[in-house]
Amino acid sequence: MKVKGYDPVEFEAAPAILRPTVMHGVAAEAGTPVAPLLSRAVALLRCFTQAEYTLSAKDLVERSGIPRSTVHRLISDMVNLGLLTRTTGGRYCVGSLVWELAQHSSIQLHLRQAAQVHLTRLYDASGENIFLGVMTTDAPETAETMYVGHVRGAQSARTNAQEGRVFPLLTTAMGVALTAAQSPEWRDQILRRLGPREMPAFTGGAEGAGDALDQWHRRGYVVQVGEGSVAIAAPILSGEGYPTAAVEMVVAPERWDERRLAHLIKSAAGAIGRDLQRHD
């Protein structure tokens, strides 16, 4: 990887993954069956996005694929429970109960609280975009990456990542850092489901993906070159001994300094992990 101001003779750079131009969260693969009513309620909640946070009943029918009569019954029940809120214009948005319950999650009560001071220090030291993210599940068949924290400033590089967004696991530095830190068996399962959308994440394609993950596992961080930015991410080792979260920094190419930034992000991830272990 060539980045302005970086001398590969002085420092051996980590292999870089190439970020696809367009990234979107993908639907999880079929897993353990759940109650139909519950799965349909979740399907309605998943229709909302940050760009389209209010939807009509017609929108919910079209996006979910659930019969119209069922959607209307669900909407009524979900509004009464606080899972949906009806706006003054007759549309719907995610309800306050969802936000209330989220405050009781481990992500909020433990991870974000332990990470906040270290994310702020990392930003103070770099001035760049700093992200906190988690794997949505520990099942390799369905795992994705969700961004749950963000610190940035006026000079931070532009990025399409933001809190609440979900991405395929192997399309972001955050997700690849989490994957690389898992066991070889876990990584092998991920690679077996590697699809065309995720192939651009590796300069060597699927055949070189296993070797690249092994190298990133040894280094403890991942570098990703995108259009107009470079990302670096390191996993956070939790008290259970495996990473459930990672820290990512997105940097403008002209400010890239792998030696310095790798030290900063690994130090921050390590500090968060130690704080989590103390609170276990």
Image: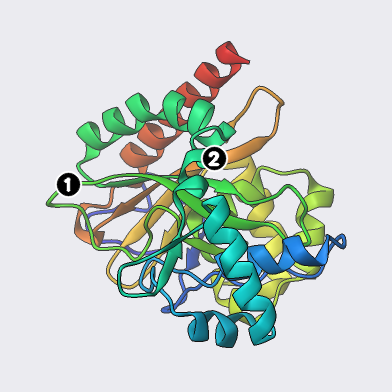
Residue 142 visible in image? yes
- Taking the spot 47% from the left edge, 74% from the top edge, the residue there is 23
Q: Residues within 10 Å of mark 2 (few under 14, many from 20)?
A: few
In this picture, residue 130 sits left or right of residue 103: left
User: Is residue 228 placed above or below 66 in the rendered structure?
Assistant: above
Kind of residue at disc 1: Gly
Q: What element carries label 1?
A: loop
Is the C-beta separation of discs 1 and 2 under 8 Å? Answer: no
Residue 220 visible in image? no
Lower position in the chain sequence, tag 1 or tag 2: 2
Q: How crowded is mark 1: few (under 14 residues within 10 Å), some or many (20 or more)?
A: few
Which mark, residue 219?
none
In this picture, residue 263 sits left or right of residue 214: left
Residue matched to label 1: 153
Quadrant placement of the C terminus? top right
In this picture, residue 1 sits left or right of residue 104: left
Taking depth in this image into account, of 257 and 278 the one nearest to the observer is: 278
What percent of the width, then of the height, locates residue 28?
70, 67
Kind of residue at disc 2: Leu
Quadrant placement of the N terminus? bottom left
Q: Residue furthest right?
A: 33
Would you identify the image quadrant in which residue 182 lies?
A: top right
Taking depth in this image into account, of 12 and 182 the one nearest to the observer is: 182
Q: Which colour scheme is used?
A: rainbow
Taking depth in this image into account, of 192 and 214 the one nearest to the observer is: 192
Q: Is mark 2 on a helix, strand or loop?
A: helix
Residue matched to label 2: 101
User: Is residue 174 placed above or below 30 in the rendered structure?
Assistant: above
What percent of the width, then of the height, locates residue 224?
44, 60
